[in-house]
Amino acid sequence: DAGVTQSPTHLIKTRGQQVTLRCSPKSGHDTVSWYQQALGQGPQFIFQYYEEEERQRGNFPDRFSGHQFPNYSSELNVNALLLGDSALYLCASSPKEYRGNQPQHFGDGTRLSIL
Amino acid sequence: GENVEQHPSTLSVQEGDSAVIKCTYSDSASNYFPWYKQELGKRPQLIIDIRSNVGEKKDQRIAVTLNKTAKHFSLHITETQPEDSAVYFCAANSPAFSTNFVFGPGTRLSVLP
């Protein structure tokens, strides 16, 4: 039973570029959440996708956008990259009918470095 | 929205001793509190969780206590081992605002041999 998988594992970009990160949820899960984890900090919620729509969003600018596909996999897109976007980006999936009172299962993350 | 504070930020204990990490939350509607362990370069992994209808939960050497009145919850690790060394994050949901978690800033636990 595959867990949450993310790709790529590492990525290096320069300021102003655009990036796409990918996530496949754990088998049986249909809800995907994205978090940004800066060095030495806890994960910060970016947004959550359910039924191919953005269900909720944290305090992140519109440069951060996403998508969910019919197979529940998801993408995170970041435009006009800034140095401050350097972080570990974590994807977490949740089971069907998730109501916020169950665990979220995390992937290994994508380490994004902006030069 | 929810705000979660966590203390201490770093904690060093001798192998075999106990470790306690404390968190406070602000949203009285929060009803689910997971704890995650993150080893260097690895994903956060759920180690224990508690719902607001219980005051304590135990799983072998790990226990979590919850005080709803004071809005704080704590992680207790007994008989610590070197492999317990990691960063620990507490989190709380915020059901009135979202189905996601607000995480604390983390506690770096070092278990000294």
Image: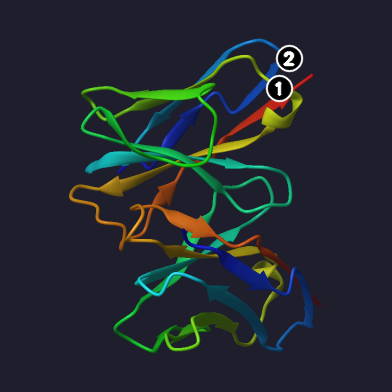
Number of numbered markers: 2
Q: Residue at x 60, y 47 (%)?
A: B42
Q: Mark 1 points at which residue?
A: A82
* Label 2 environment density (alpha carbons within 10 Å; few <14, some 14–19, many ≥20): some
Q: Mark 2 points at which residue?
A: A15
Q: Which one is in front, A108 or A20?
A: A20
The local secondary structure at tag 2 comes to: loop
Residue A39 lies, in percent from the top left, at: 73, 45
In the image: residue B69, left or right of residue B104:
left
* Label 1 environment density (alpha carbons within 10 Å; few <14, some 14–19, many ≥20): some
- Callout 2 amino acid: Arg
Sequence order check, earlier mark of 2 and 1: 2
State which quarter of the image contains the N terminus of chain A.
top left
Seen from this angle, which residue lies furthest left? A97
Question: Is the residue under label 1 in contact with that under label 2 (CB below 8 Å)?
Answer: yes
Residue A91 lies, in percent from the top left, at: 46, 39
User: Could you tell me if residue B80 is visible in this image?
Assistant: yes
In the image: residue B104, left or right of residue B50:
right
Q: Which residue is drawn at 45% across and 23% down?
A: A65
